[in-house]
Amino acid sequence: MRILVFQHVAVEHPGIFREFLRADGVPWDAIELDAGEPIPDLSCYDALWVMGGPMDVWDVEEHPWLIPEKQAIRRWVRELERPFLGVCLGHQLLADALGGTCGPQRPPEVGILDVSLTEEGKRDDVFGRQPATAQALQWHGVRVAQPPEGAVVLASSPACRVQAMRVGRCAWSAQYHVELEDATIPAWGCIPEYAAALEKVQGKGALQRLAAEAQPLMPTFKDCARRLYEDFMKAASALRLAS
């Protein structure tokens, strides 16, 4: 298996998933779209991961590469029907690319907040081994307002109905961050848009408080990430055999 990763800012990479990929000997290529790197031939890859970023799905004038990215996501999921995993912006791009809609998240979800599986989520091949209710890192001011056709909501929170979804038989995504590692929060705090959003919601000194709050939860975050990775890879392998 070879994985293609779309990145939108250098510090929003696959995080702890890199450790799992390295241990399993799974090759992967990261395409830094915001740096102008072109999208390669999709036929060379078995799975597509789309990570987060500080831009919004509708920022196509400022970031015109969002247009071919959405086209690639649509082709990957609807035409090629290959395994897809989206996180945060990647979750929103999946919805937007497939005919759903995104809109402002009011209030923004920033911090460590509860996310709960739906009944469908508890039975899902990829999300089913996640805790029924778990604390998760949220850092977003946009939400999936209307999921695309064929979507099933897998997780929700009080402020955001579509925290995770499955689209069709091959695509999964999460609004919250499942890829955390120890360096994640300090690194993201260096992005001006993220720092501003965090301080707007939680006040001065929010970055240090958030990092301190997350530290004792890291073993749980990593365990959840491990399960999600294992179950996605298992589902991806099954899809490859069935195709």
Image: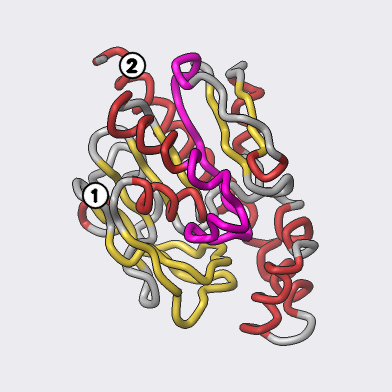
**Measuring 53% from the left and 24% from the top, which residue is drawn there?**
3
Picture coordinates of residue 96, whole percent (x, y): 37, 53
Label pair 2/1, CB-CB below 8 angstroms = no
Query: Is 47 inside the magenta-drawn segment?
Result: yes
Instruction: Establish if 110 lies above or below 180.
Output: below
Q: What x and y, as percent, mark residue 233?
A: 43, 27
| Drawn side of residue 152 relative to residue 145, left or right | left
Within 10 Å of disc 1 (Cα), the crowding (few <14, some 14-19, many 20+) is some
Residue on which disc 2 sits: 240
Residue with the mark numbered 1? 151
Q: Is residue 219 magenta?
A: no
Residue 15 appears in the rendering:
no
Residue in the picture at 63% in, 50% down: 180
Amino acid type, mark 1: Ala
Q: Is residue 230 above or below residue 221?
A: above
The dominant secondary structure in magenta is: loop
Q: Residues within 10 Å of mark 2 (few under 14, many from 20)?
A: some
Q: Which residues are magenta?
A: 42-69
**Quarter of the picture holding the C terminus:** top left
**Amino acid tagged 2:** Arg
**Residue at x 24% of width, y 15% of height:** 242
Which quarter of the picture shows residue 158?
bottom left
**Residue 192 lies in quadrant:** bottom right
177 vs 13, nearest the viewer: 13
Q: Secondary structure at mark 2?
A: helix
How far is the residue under mark 2 from the one under mark 1?
21 Å
Colour scheme = secondary structure
User: Which residue is farthest bottom?
Assistant: 203
Viewer-nearest residue: 195 or 58: 58
Against 140, is 4 above or below? above
Q: Nearer the viewer, residue 234 or 195?
A: 195
Q: Position of residue 216 (x, y in %)?
A: 67, 62
